[in-house]
Image (spheres, rainbow, N blue to C red):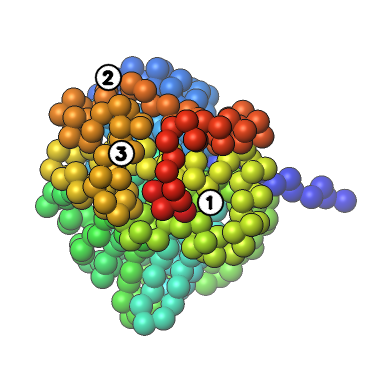
Amino acid sequence: MRKKARFSSLPTATGTIARAAYARALEARLEVESLLKSSSLTSQQIKNSQVRMSVKNQIKFLSLVAKELPDPFLGIHLAENIELREMGLPYYVIASSETLGDALRRLARYSGITNEGVRITCHEGKDITVRFDYVGVSRLSDRHQIECFVAILSRLCRQLTGLSFSPTRVKLAHRRTELPAEIKKVFGCKVSFGSDADEVVYPRLADTIASVNADPYLNSLLVRYCEEALSNRRVHSGAWRLKVENAIVPLLPHGQAKMEEIAKRLGVSRRTLTRLLASEGCTFVGILDALRLDLAKSYLREQNLQTSEVAWLLGFAEVSAFNHACRRWTGKTPKQLQSAGAESFNGRGLTASIFSCGAFGAPTLFLNSRLFNRLGRRNEEDWGC
């Protein structure tokens, strides 16, 4: 009797994107071994395509390589040159589909074989919307992997149809202040950053566009193989801390990152969410504060963003509340931090360590509640609860 597949709690990926980044780093003569070590990756994982790697570690590696090159659009540049057949079985079942609509549905169904940390869904209505949701991995930490995914999707659709076919719009949750003309050509449509979701939207007619390599007999056979592979690669949805974090990010600029709203979106009551987070040594307020600190680091590095804009992006109703939070985090005002540069955040950074969820287990809750008051928490509204 066949043993039942064991579920993984740590999302993994085949590592195709990380290996492409590794090759790019070698070409640039970077210290690749130190970059791998900093990403908790090994040479064996990179050199052996049969060895999977943590999605979290892949994201970290892409970020480090992009910084060292430097290449702020590394994911997109990688997508332009990756051999699509390296996607393996999912590529062939997609490529042999009868129509582009079928291909997109196959992509949504079997993408988890390649990367368990991103769930792709295909929503059909007036348009066809391909949506990317992060599972067991923080969306906040990623930029290059998701941009690589979207660029590969655009390239794949053109290859399957043999047409210069582009989506009608692309939405990405992370923020960028500008997009060079050559990068815009990759997508062929308007790209909106700082959106409430990661989505690629195609016109409804895409459903019936014939695939140039359609092979219904081969496709039927590959679907069976994919179903078997998928059943062996099921992954848990991940920690509640990550679910809450990923739900908070798109709601911050709209002032809707309240615990009631997050609980509703996650399909639980506020009381249940509090209990679930407590089991991981977390509090909602702690997650929200640490998340705001991480985002503040990123936004304040962009010199063209005004303090008032950053405050809005972080969900503060008043600039004064943002100033108060920055002083609590670092002892400095936002303008002082922008003038001094990113290294300014390496000073006090007290809140981030205090509210790091699950680092010390359940006792962290006791530390949170006592240090919370010492740090000057004034009221629930100040924290967006």
Q: Are marks 3 and 1 in contact (CB under 8 Å)?
A: no
The Cα–Cα distance between marks 2 and 1, rounded to whole angstroms, is 38 Å
Check disc 1 and report its element: helix, strand or loop.
helix
* Quarter-of-image position of residue 186: bottom left
Q: Is residue 363 above or below residue 383?
A: above
Q: Is residue 125 above or below residue 318?
A: below
> Residue at (44%, 40%) from the top-left corner?
377
Q: Nearer the viewer, mark 3 or mark 1?
A: 3
Left-right relation of 362 to 262:
right
Q: Are marks 2 and 1 in contact (CB under 8 Å)?
A: no
Left-right relation of 303 to 350:
left
* Quarter-of-image position of residue 191: bottom left
Question: Which amino acid does the dot numbered 2 rest on?
Answer: Arg
In the picture of the structure, the residue carrying the numbered disc 3 is: 324
Check disc 3 and report its element: helix, strand or loop.
helix
Q: Nearer the viewer, residue 215 or 142?
A: 142
Question: Which amino acid does the dot numbered 1 rest on?
Answer: Lys
From the top left corner, tell me how far across and down residue 347 is, in percent. Answer: 33, 21
In the picture of the structure, the residue carrying the numbered disc 2 is: 29
Q: Nearer the viewer, residue 96 or 361?
A: 361
Marking on residue 190: none
Question: Which amino acid does the dot numbered 3 rest on?
Answer: His
Q: Nearer the viewer, residue 291 or 364?
A: 364
- Mark 1 crowdedness (10 Å alpha carbons): few <14, some 14-19, many ≥20: some
From the top left corner, tell me how far across and down residue 330 is, in percent. Answer: 32, 28
In the picture of the structure, the residue carrying the numbered disc 1 is: 243
The Cα–Cα distance between marks 2 and 3, rounded to whole angstroms, is 44 Å
> Residue at (25%, 45%) from the top-left corner?
320
Q: Nearer the viewer, mark 2 or mark 1?
A: 1
From the top left corner, tell me how far across and down residue 96 is, in percent. Answer: 47, 65
Left-right relation of 369 to 320:
right
Please identify the residue farthest to the right as the structure is shown: 1
